Amino acid sequence: MTGGDAALWQGFTDFHSHLFPAVDDGSQSVAQSLGALAQFAGQGAATCLTTPHFDASLTKLPAAFAARLEAFDAAWAALEAAHAAYEGPALPRIARGVELMLDDPDPDLSDARLRLAGGPFVLVEFPAMQLPPNAEWAMHNLRRQGWRPIIAHPERYRNHDARLTVLSRCRAAGAHLQVNAGSFLGQHGERARTVANVLLSLGWIDYLASDFHARGEPSTAKAAALLARRGAAAQVQRLTVENPARILSGDGPLPVAPVESVQARSWWGRALARLLGER
Ligand SMILES: [Fe+2]
């Protein structure tokens, strides 16, 4: 990585991580969360919006809903206090949201704690790494209520067809797409890496984020450097800095230009078709 490359993502906003201490499969302590934030600072992050797992179905179960959010509030308060008292090198600013598992396609998102920094955007995923055939219905539904769904790591779903039909319908319904930085490094397997590259070549990715679980290191800088080396410097800047920052001001993402040439795009398309056993 060169210093010039690193400037591309300097001041980035990461909005997908699991750094609320001890509420999900991410960080298990305040100290671990602070360590993770220090790693983000080392990579140039200005802001980390952290997003513990939350089941959408809880919004229909008042007692369970209150209990889960109470646990989140306590963890968040502990993290905020430790962040404020931290005396080492400057840490990124922190803000909260959730990664909403759409086990119910029609959740009530009126509680601001379920949305990214309390604004209109909500980070969503679907159960069992399968994109439901009618996923766009949930996207329409959220948009109709004034929310802006961002689908987390679409490249990781295991049931895409070679034309990415369902994802295409979700985009048409107004959903935005957040790819995990680590997918470009093969951290979620070859299929996810291939789909991530196809999405990049199509210009469908709106955001890159880390989905960091406080193990190892955030993948942001390595993935951004890799894409910059492949000639996607302008896209890297938009995917890591510009578009994520717009979430905090309530603005939608700016378009991201397709990365590969037409030939390369068809190469990735063929690779995806091969991977999925289609011709
Ligand atoms: Fe996540």
Image (tube, rainbow, N blue to C red):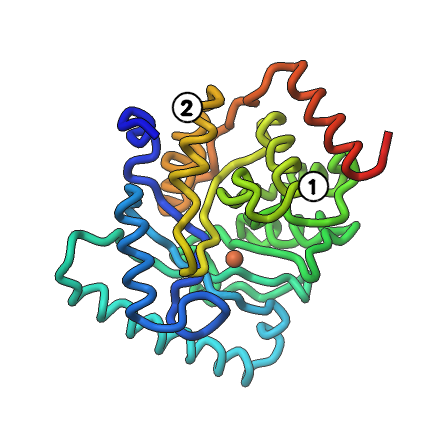
Identify the secondary structure beneath mark 1: helix
Q: Which residue is mark 1?
A: 167
Q: Which residue sits at x=47%, y=38%?
A: 252
Q: Quarter-wise, where is residue 263 in the image? A: top right
Q: Which residue is mark 2?
A: 233
Say which residue appears at 69% left-offset and 56% top-offset.
Answer: 129
Q: In front: 228, or 204?
A: 228
Quadrant holding the N terminus: top left
- Visible residue check, residue 206: yes
Q: Does 26 appear above or below 268?
A: below
Number of the front mark, 2 or 1? 2
The location of residue 240, given as percent across then percent down, is 41, 37
From the viewer's perspective, tell me whether residue 97 is left or right of residue 257. Answer: left
2 relative position to 70: left or right:
left
Residue type beneath disc 1: Leu
Residue placed furthest toward the left: 87
Q: Give the answer, above or below, for where 214 lies relative to 168.
A: below
For the residues marked 2 and 1, what is the alpha-carbon distance in whole angstroms? Answer: 25 Å
Residue at 41% across, 42% down: 220
Horizontal placement of 81 versus 261: left or right? left
Q: Give the residue type at disc 2.
A: Ala
Q: Position of residue 245 (x, y in %)?
A: 36, 41
Query: From where the camera sits, is residue 97 visible?
Result: no
- Residue at image position (37%, 47%) is 248
Categorize mark 1 by other alpha carbons within 10 Å: few (<14), some (14-19), many (20+): many
**Residue contact at pointers 2 and 1, CB within 8 angstroms:** no
182 or 162, which is in the foreground? 182
